[in-house]
Amino acid sequence: MADKIVGKSRYSRNITLRIIGEEGQKTLRKKTVSIVGLGAIGTVVAELLSRLGVNLILIDNDKIDISNLQRQLIYNENDIGKYKTDAACKKLKKINSEIKIKKYRKTLTKNNLNILDSDLILDCTDNLKARFLINEYCLLTKMPWIHAAAIKTHGVLCNFTPADSEKPCFACIYKKNSDIETCEDSGVFNGITVLVATLQATQALKMLLNYKIMEDFLRIDIWNENIERLKVKKDTNCKICQMDTITQRVEIGDFTLKLCKTKAAYSVKPFRNVRLNLNQIKNVYTPIIETPLLLIVKIKGYEVIVHNYGELIFKDLKNEVIIKQIAKDVYSLGDSSKLKIKQKH
């Protein structure tokens, strides 16, 4: 009964706020947001969204230590040694028992990206590798996400909307070999993490309610009271966000491979150079066409183009499970260089 009385309901101040209103509040209660990283930014944004009535997916594999208490506001001394997902979930449920919370005590990898499935993903991690995984997953699923980070007295924020193919992706801005400072090495002021988290929660609210969102890359220096809005453009040479290409990392034996879907076909090739032994391959699979540089062979009823530099092209086959199995069989035969390629996660 109390929820019907605006002045007394849990969300009454949201409902009287014009940017949300009654319909907006109904929408928020149906939305789910994934938060990757329950540190300084993640804990604040999780609390803000829980108070708005948004359902949450919490992802983190770390335990709380005493150095976290300087900036990770949802924890206290009694939480030291506990897993962040457990402690955060318990606190958030006390704040709002009405919302649904899923928790995953996991490190994000290419093999468990399905746990991100939600209406919006918030990057609150300090792990560059995880951010590239989020970026590729969101390009694949067309899911929006918000990147946020803080170090020293500086913070950054950027919205990514993969459904709009004209917009840049994370890899357009950051490179794989980018150096990244850590809070452990450089320190961080707790005021900047709270500010960045608040801005991220605000952008999340806009996305969930279909408001126009910020299109710039926001850079903040809280110590010098400086805020910059930088225009970011799509990198026309970015191989990750090409309109007609979706790339996934897959592990096959000792190889880390790139499975790539284009408009024309699927292809598989190693991330490092190898030399396939075409003679060995044609001893197992009868070639349809044979040249010094490539073979076209029939495997499991499908034509496969095998290049000596390691790439396999599947012209007609669309089933990724079968593609991976064929690739496994071919690579187990054909690495004449005997290179052992370290698996990447």
Image (tube, rainbow, N blue to C red):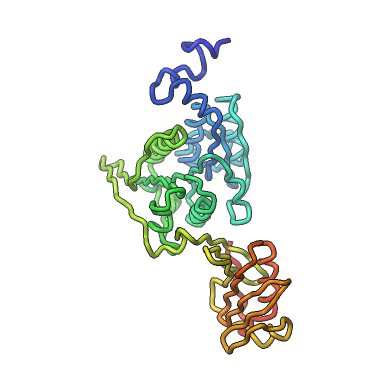
Residue 288 vs 246, above or below: the answer is below
For the point 33% across and 46% down, which residue is it?
216
Pinpoint residue 155: horizontal percent, then vertical percent: 36, 45
**Drawn side of residue 209 relative to residue 294, left or right:** left
Residue 33 vs 286, above or below: the answer is above
Pinpoint residue 233: horizontal percent, then vertical percent: 33, 55
**Drawn side of residue 124 relative to residue 64, left or right:** left
Residue 338 can be seen in this image: no
Task: Give residue 86's quadrant in the image.
Answer: top right
Residue 219 vs 324, above or below: the answer is above
Comparing 257 with 242, the one in front is: 242
Comparing 156 with 144, the one in front is: 144
For the point 42% across and 45% down, which residue is it?
148
Task: Give residue 206's quadrant in the image.
Answer: top left
Residue 37 vs 78, above or below: the answer is below
Task: Give residue 295's quadrant in the image.
Answer: bottom right
**Drawn side of residue 298 relative to residue 75, left or right:** right
For the point 58% across and 51% down, which residue is it?
108
For the point 46% across and 40% down, which residue is it?
41
Residue 74 can be seen in this image: yes
Comparing 75 with 272, the one in front is: 272
Pinpoint residue 10: horizontal percent, then vertical percent: 51, 18
Quadrant where the N terminus is found in the figure: top right
Q: How many marks?
A: 0
Pinpoint residue 79: horizontal percent, then vertical percent: 58, 36
Quadrant where the C terminus is found in the figure: bottom right
